[in-house]
Image: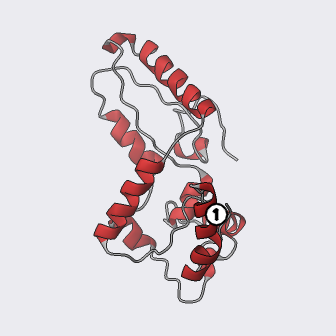
């Protein structure tokens, strides 16, 4: 069920609740839309627990995940099949949504503004909305910048390491490490 971000309580009572009662379950999309953003931490913890308990992946996603884990185990023969997986999501939409500043040059700022507008149509330009990139960074709400990820990666645990996936502006951020440029 598609819901508008920041829908009112009456919307959930009048539109979502009847579907929930009729079907026994509803999928609210996009998943990141919440009933409220400013709630006490204990309520937020309960919301996170409820989301975790309710989360079920479709069969194709479960099969893909099992295949990926099998491959990582096989490629980790030098460590007895042990591996560490770290989700370093530094893709354009994630960087844009975080409202964090990395290089801070005007090209990046314009690109991130455009990505925010494409993905969230006005959400970040609402009257009264305060975006504070420095506070986001200080409070740990920014994805690791690629250079920070490299620093973490360089603390090698005396084991071979592999990096899989797409990195936003790969050549710019991972010069000398990227095998291919998958950036947009």
Identify residue for label 1: 19
Residue 144 visible in rendering = no
Establish if 60 lies above or below 110: above
The residue drawn where x is 33% and y is 19% is 82
Q: Quadrant of residue 118?
A: bottom right
- Specify whether 18 is left or right of 158: right
Establish if 18 lies above or below 151: below
Q: Residues within 10 Å of mark 1 (few under 14, many from 20)?
A: some
Residue 182 placement (x, y as % from top left): 66, 38
Secondary structure beneath dot 1 equals: helix
Pick out the residue farthest to the bottom: 128
The residue drawn where x is 70% and y is 72% is 121
The residue drawn where x is 53% and y is 46% is 173
- Specify whether 176 is left or right of 43: right
Establish if 14 lies above or below 58: below
Q: Nearer the viewer, residue 173 or 142?
A: 142
- Specify whether 161 is left or right of 128: left
């Amino acid at each position: 069920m598609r819901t508008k971000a920041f829908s009112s309580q009456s919307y959930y009572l009048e539109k979502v609740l009847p579907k929930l009662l009729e079907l026994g379950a509803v999928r609210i999309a996009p998943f990141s839309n919440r009933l409220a953003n400013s709630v006490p931490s204990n309520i937020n913890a309960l919301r996170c627990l409820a989301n975790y308990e309710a989360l079920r992946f479709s069969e194709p996603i479960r099969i893909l995940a099992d295949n990926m884990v099998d491959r990582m185990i096989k490629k980790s023969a030098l460590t007895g099949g042990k591996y560490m997986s770290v989700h370093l999501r530094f893709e354009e939409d994630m960087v844009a949504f975080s409202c964090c500043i990395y290089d801070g040059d005007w090209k990046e700022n314009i690109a991130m503004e455009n990505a925010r507008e494409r993905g969230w149509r006005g959400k970040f330009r609402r009257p009264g909305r305060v975006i504070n990139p420095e506070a986001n960074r200080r409070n740990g709400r920014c994805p690791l910048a690629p250079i920070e990820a490299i620093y973490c990666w360089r603390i090698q645990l005396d084991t071979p390491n592999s990096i899989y996936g797409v990195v936003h502006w790969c050549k710019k951020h991972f010069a000398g490490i990227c095998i291919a440029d998958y950036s947009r």
